[in-house]
């Protein structure tokens, strides 16, 4: 586990993250089996997870009556996510997302992930802000992603 006092730059696959000081991270894996990136708060209320080759789970939950979907974009980055409709639960819950980023040639690359929210916390403005701050910090290198679409 690594917690820091300023933004920490972390590379995962071809993406670069600026990890906020209020969050910790761990990275593991290897080229043969793939990489994993875990980003979490020190109290472990939230765990944001990225895995090499992870499918875009948010697309599977889009339209599910138990989940709400949102999309944000600023012309450069687009963020899609689905989160549980119930704001507080007695059990852990999952939010699913993917970020779409252009490369230098204009091709769009998608990075899927998920956010585990520990029991009793649920989806809230706080969890949304933590996720959005992290996702808005991501930039992309120049190698194609497995989830690529043409821009």
Image (cartoon, helix red, strand yellow):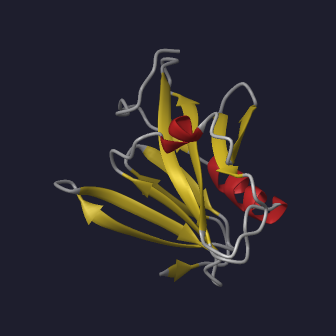
* Residue 134 location, quadrant: bottom right
Taking 46 as reference, is 17 above or below it? above
Q: Is residue 43 or residue 64 the one in the foreground?
A: 64
Please give the count of numbered marks on the rendered protein. Answer: 0
Res 136 seen here: no
Q: Residue at x 77, y 57 (%)?
A: 129
Q: Is residue 19 or residue 63 the one in the foreground?
A: 63
Taking 28 as reference, is 146 above or below it? above
x and y percentages locating residue 7 in the rendered image:
64, 65
* Residue 76 location, quadrant: top right
Taking 123 as reference, is 81 above or below it? above
Q: Residue at x 32, y 57 (%)?
A: 35
In the rendered structure, the answer to whether residue 133 lies left or right of residue 8 reads: right
x and y percentages locating residue 131 in the rendered image:
68, 56
x and y percentages locating residue 77 in the rendered image:
65, 33
Q: Residue furthest front?
A: 65
Res 63 seen here: yes
Q: Residue at x 72, y 61 (%)?
A: 130
Q: Residue furthest top?
A: 151
Q: Residue at x 65, y 38 (%)?
A: 79
């Amino acid at each position: 586990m690594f917690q820091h006092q300023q933004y920490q730059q972390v590379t995962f696959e071809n993406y670069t993250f600026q990890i906020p000081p209020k969050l910790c991270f761990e990275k593991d894996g290897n080229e043969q089996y793939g990489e994993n990136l875990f980003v979490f708060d020190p109290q472990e209320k939230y765990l944001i997870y990225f895995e090499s080759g992870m499918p875009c789970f948010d697309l599977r939950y889009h339209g599910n009556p138990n989940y709400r979907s949102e999309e944000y974009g600023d012309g450069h980055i687009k963020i899609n996510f689905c989160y549980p409709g119930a704001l507080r639960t007695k059990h852990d819950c999952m939010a699913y997302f993917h970020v779409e980023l252009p490369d230098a040639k204009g091709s769009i690359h998608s990075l899927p992930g998920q956010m585990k929210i520990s029991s009793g916390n649920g989806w809230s403005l706080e969890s949304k802000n933590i996720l959005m701050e992290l996702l808005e910090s991501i930039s992309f290198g120049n190698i194609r992603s497995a989830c690529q679409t043409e821009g």
